[in-house]
Image (cartoon, rainbow, N blue to C red):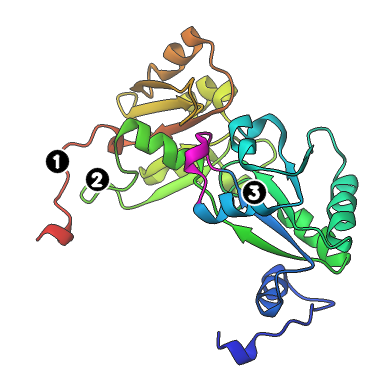
Amino acid sequence: MENEKVTDKLPEKGDYFSIVVAQQGKPDTNLVYFVGAGPGDPKYITVKGRELLESADLVMYAGSLVNADVLNYTHCEMIDSFGMKFEDIVDMLSKYVNAGKRVVRLHSGDPSLYGAIIEQIDGLRKCGIGVKIIPGVTSLFAAAAAIKTQLTIKGITETLIITRPEGITLETDSIKELSRHNATMAIYLGTDKLRKITEEVAYSDDTPAAVVYHASWKDEKIVLGTVGDIADRVEKLGIERSAVIIIGNVLKPENFKRSHLYE
């Protein structure tokens, strides 16, 4: 989009994306910065994210999902949003912005993936406040780094499916159906349902599987196995949450093809 087509007038109505684009022409005031804190290791936050934490007047963070070490970059008032009602979150953010403060809303991982930020963007929009989103490293990518593999490998699969267990998902998001693609599958928020997941997926029992707990944190744990035995391995370690599940042959790459980049 050409600069002359970008306006700083906030649309009264319209989709979320046109609202965000309209904010590109506004100066860095009257904004809430949604910052991705990364997966855990405080050094995994982006340079931009760290700069905003260091210059903020208020940082509202997502409870224990954000490693407390990341908060050491701040020199301002901090508010833990755990247990707060949605309306109270929006009201608090709005109050500080209207007082001329630089406000950071700190989310774990990357805000765009299971970050529940659209509701907040909408609430702030209704208060006449815009947003800027600073991406972060999601736990899936930290998990792949810990395992020392790629999530897409030429000759094995070029497709990555990211999902979560059924329940509050759409019927079309069925893990059983999605697994029929035989792509790499990453499952968030599903460690406590791991056995049910492995019983339902279309992958064969000998398909490699991994569970990475607290990827990049100091207490990181990597559990490797197969669809047939990963649930037993994870249960023995007592891991029930704060982990990402990865299923697919990229975890044990054999017969892969050299990337055309090296040809």
Q: Is residue 8 above or below residue 125?
A: below
The residue tagged 2 is 156
Give the residue type that dot 3 points to: Leu
Residue that lies at the very extreme toward the bottom in this rendered image: 4
Q: Nearer the viewer, residue 76 or 84?
A: 76
Q: Say which residue appears at 69% left-offset and 76% top-offset.
A: 18
Contact? badges 2 and 3 (CB < 8 Å): no
Residue furthest front as drawn = 75
Counting other residues with Cα less than 10 Å from the Cα at mark 3, is it few (<14), some (14-19), or many (20 or more)?
many
Image coordinates of residue 210 in percent, x first then y, are: 39, 27
User: Residue 193: which quarter of the image?
Assistant: top right
Question: Of residues 170 and 127, which is closer to you in this image?
Answer: 127
Q: Residues within 10 Å of mark 1 (few under 14, many from 20)?
A: few
Identify the element where label 2 is drawn: loop
Spatial separation of the CA atoms under disc 2 and disc 3: 40 Å
Residue that carries the numbered disc 1 in the rendered image: 255
Numbered range of the magenta stretch: 38-46
Instruction: Name the chief secondary structure element in magenta.
Output: loop
Which amino acid, mark 1? Asn
Q: Is residue 95 above or below residue 226?
A: below
Q: Position of residue 108 (x, y in %)?
A: 61, 41
Which sits earlier in the primary sequence, circle 2 or circle 3? 3
Q: Quick one: label 2, few (<14), some, or many (20+) residues within 10 Å?
A: some
First reached walking from the N terminus: tag 1 or tag 2: 2
Q: Label for residue 53?
A: 3
Nearest to N terminus: mark 3 or mark 1: 3
Mark 3 falls on what kind of element?
helix
Asked if marks 1 and 2 touch (Cβ < 8 Å), the reply is: yes
Does residue 62 appear in the picture of this structure?
Answer: yes
Q: Quadrant of residue 68?
A: top right
